[in-house]
Image: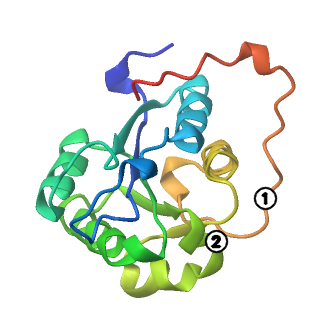
Amino acid sequence: MPSLSSRPRLLLVRLPPWLSRRNRHPHDLMWPVALLNAQTLARAAGWHTQILDLHVEALTGPQLAARVVDFHPDVLVVDTMTPTLATALQLARAVAVRSPNTKRWAVGQHATACPGDLLAKSAFQRALSGEADVAIGNELALTSLSDATTSGPHGRLQLEDLDSLPPVDPRG
């Protein structure tokens, strides 16, 4: 496997639904299972990946954008839903300005239901629909870094031997 510095970099960001509110309720603290699965698929394909989970890290908008840019991702995937739409758009636009070569993809409930909201004004280049781990795995398998805006129907990534995948790393 190539060294970390030569592998493509993927950053997965999970925005919690309470992000725009002061009250954070512990019942919302759940493992990011779909992103951990996507990370496992990406690592098996040779990507250097990291998960930035705002369910457990409290960052302001500027701090979040700085963390994303400091990671130097080739692809940024933001898991968002309707309550976090404004934050997701703000992050994508900040990354577009500060790191224009970073491909920006959105996944999650809002990306599936209303992809046009995320693609507006060049915030995100892709809105992936369906289950996050499958959608991200398929896009990484079917998209080259030079053309991360490819659209159209894609076949599903077929996994024949699940035992060949590395285990999910809960540390992200």
Secondary-structure class at tag 1: loop
Q: Nearer the N terminus, badge 1 or badge 2? A: 2
Q: Is residue 75 visible?
A: no
Residue 79, compared with residue 169, is above or below; it is below
Q: Quadrant of the C terminus?
A: top left
Where is residue 66 shown, x and y percent of the image?
15, 52
Q: Around disc 1, counting alpha carbons within 10 Å, would you say few (fewer than 14), some (14 to 19), or many (20 or more)?
A: few
Work out whether residue 167 or residue 10 is closer to the camera in this orientation and state it. 167
Residue 123, compared with residue 144, is above or below; it is below
Secondary-structure class at tag 2: helix
Which amino acid is tagged 1?
Answer: His
Q: What residue do we see at 39% from left, 24% from top?
A: 171
Q: What residue do we see at 65% from left, 43% from top?
A: 137
Q: Is residue 4 visible?
A: yes
Which residue has dot 1 on it?
Answer: 154
Q: What residue do we see at 67% from left, 42% from top?
A: 141
Left or right: residue 161 versus residue 52 is right
Which amino acid is tagged 2?
Answer: Thr
Which residue has dot 2 on it?
Answer: 112
Colour scheme of the rendered structure: rainbow
Left or right: residue 157 versus residue 72 is right
Where is residue 23 shown, x and y percent of the image?
26, 63
Count of numbered tags: 2
Residue 169, compared with residue 129, is above or below; it is above
| Residue 63 quadrant | bottom left
Q: What residue do we see at 49% from left, 49% from top?
A: 145
Q: Are marks 1 and 2 in contact (CB under 8 Å)?
A: no
